[in-house]
Every structure is written in C-alpha cells, then in structure tokens.
Image: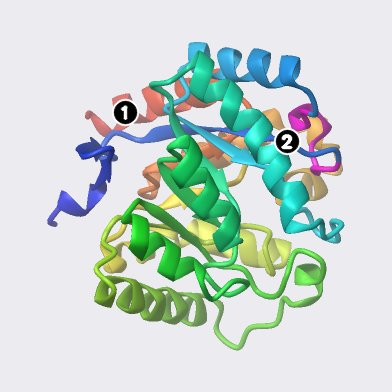
Amino acid sequence: MNETYRKINIRGELYDLGTPRVMGVLNITPDSFYSGSRINDETGILRRSEEMLEAGADILDIGGYSSRPGADDISEQEELERDIMALKIIRKEFPSAIVSLDTFRSKVADAGINDYGVDIINDISGGELDRAMFDTIEKHNIPYILMHMKGRPQNMHLNTEYDDLFSEILKWFSEKKQELVLRGIRDIIIDPGFGFGKSIEHNFTLLNQLERFGVLELPIMAGLSRKSMIWRSLNISPEESLNGTTVLNTVALMKGASIIRVHDVAEARQVVQLVKLIKGS
C-alpha cells in the first residue's frame, strides 16, 4: 500500500505519521468531562504544557470550547480569549512545539493561524457547524483534522441512530475528502469521533473496524482517552480510566491509527513504543 499519505506538511516540511504520534490535550475550560484536564490560568497552562512536552508529546492540542455531551455553548469571543491565553504562553516558552487548535469556528481558526502560527486545525464538526471552515483551511493550506460528529455537542448524545453505522460514516468521510481535495487541501487526517453522536456499542464497533477506514488513504486519529465508553462500561469514573484508555489506545494503534489524542502522555508513549515492538517497526 502507498504510505505517502501518512506524511503531512508542517511549516513547509514533511511530517511523518508512519510512526504513531501522541497528541496531548490542553483543555482551557472549566467544564471538560475529565477534571484532570481542566486548566484555567497561565501557571497551569505553562506547567501542563511543559509536562506534556517533556513526557514526549509530539503535538499539543489546545481547546477553549468544551465538547462534552450537554456542554454549555460559549461565545466565539470567549473561546478565542481562552485559546489566546494558552497560545501566547506556548509560542513564547515552547516556540518549536507543534500546536493543534481544537475549534469548529472558522474565525477562531483564522486568528490562531494568523496571529500565533497554529500548525493544525482540529475540527470536531468536520465543517458542519461553520461552513466557512473549509475556506479558512484552503486559505492557509495547513493540516486539517476532519472528525465525524452527529449533531452538536449540546445534543449529540440524542443523535445516535444509524441504519448502517460504518457505511454511513465512511460515505460521509469520502464526500468530505472529495470536497477538500477539490479545494486543493490534501493534508487531511480523519477522526471517527468516538463518543460524538454514537452509542457505547457504536464506539466499540468503530474501534474494532478501525482498519477499514484505510480505504480512504488518510491518516487516522483516535481520541479515546478516558471517554465514557471506558468508564461507563467498567462502572468507574473518568479519573479511574487510565488503564482502560491504555488498552483501547493499543487496539487503535494495532488497527492503524497514526495519532492518539490523550490526557496522559507518558503512558501513551509507552503504548507507542510497545506496539512498535509488536509490529517489528
């Protein structure tokens, strides 16, 4: 199989996703589902960023909008202010860090790219919640994480009906890929959107069939860290879900994921190292 699709352009250089990468989550929010990921001040941002980078994070993913089920909908300005607080610190203290901005709003994405050199846009809505997002990605020509979500964060837990789960999501990705490629956008990463408009059963089905997305010839990101599919299934809390996260990240990497998005970077790096040994790569 042609593996060139596992390379993306970061700052004019090819960035290899053939070796799995670890994306560390920085939630600049007061209400993200996992309390251990919430950061609301400059000291916390600096400390957490440093911890993640020292632990081996390849990418830092900054998000100022909580996308947990039923989360409050905040204004574009409030989201941007939260993001800017983090971006200023990271660009000053860790200028070489690869930064992803987790936003579905085109104006937030545009400001992050223009003013703070954001390297990747991570859009939970795949362009569905802001139709100008694809225009912004085309304008800046930077890597774009295309995630599947059914509904909005406020109601996605009520939108979990599918006639054929995998076929519908694969068709959605295929159509989005075609639209992006026609615009000249080729650095595309797909994310099945575990927990975003899917039941727990759906999430495990998607993970079990993750390698089937390989037909799209696009890198795959898996965001499984401490998700409710783990802690609800095991009748524990998000705070107790690290072991389950490690298990599911291992499965995702074995089935072809190129990026794992995590709260716990050191443990994720161990997963990557051991899976590489299993695969002999």
Residue at 55% across / 23% down in the picture? Answer: 90
Above or below, 190 against 79 in this view is: below
Q: Secondary structure at mark 1?
A: helix
Q: Secondary structure at mark 2?
A: loop
User: Is the C terminus in the top left, top right, bottom left or bottom right quadrant?
Assistant: top left
Image disc number at residue 28: 2
- 70 within the magenta span: no
User: Is the N terminus in the top left, top right, bottom left or bottom right quadrant?
Assistant: bottom left
Q: Nearer the viewer, residue 203 or 152?
A: 152
Q: Quick check: 187 left or right of 173?
A: left
Q: Nearer the viewer, residue 22 or 31?
A: 31
Q: Tag 2 or tag 1, which sits nearer the N-term?
A: 2
Image location (x, y in percent) of residue 132: 51, 72
Which image quadrant for residue 214?
bottom left
- What residue is disc 1 on? 276
Image location (x, y in percent) of residue 148: 55, 67
The amino acid sitting under disc 2 is Ile
Q: Quick check: 16 left or right of 123?
A: left
Q: Residues within 10 Å of mark 1 (few under 14, many from 20)?
A: some
Residue at 42% across / 69% down in the picture? Answer: 135
Image disc number at residue 126: none
Q: Which residues are magenta?
A: 31-39
Q: Residues within 10 Å of mark 2 (few under 14, many from 20)?
A: many
Which image quadrant for residue 238?
top right
Q: Mark 1 and mark 2: span between their CA atoms?
A: 32 Å
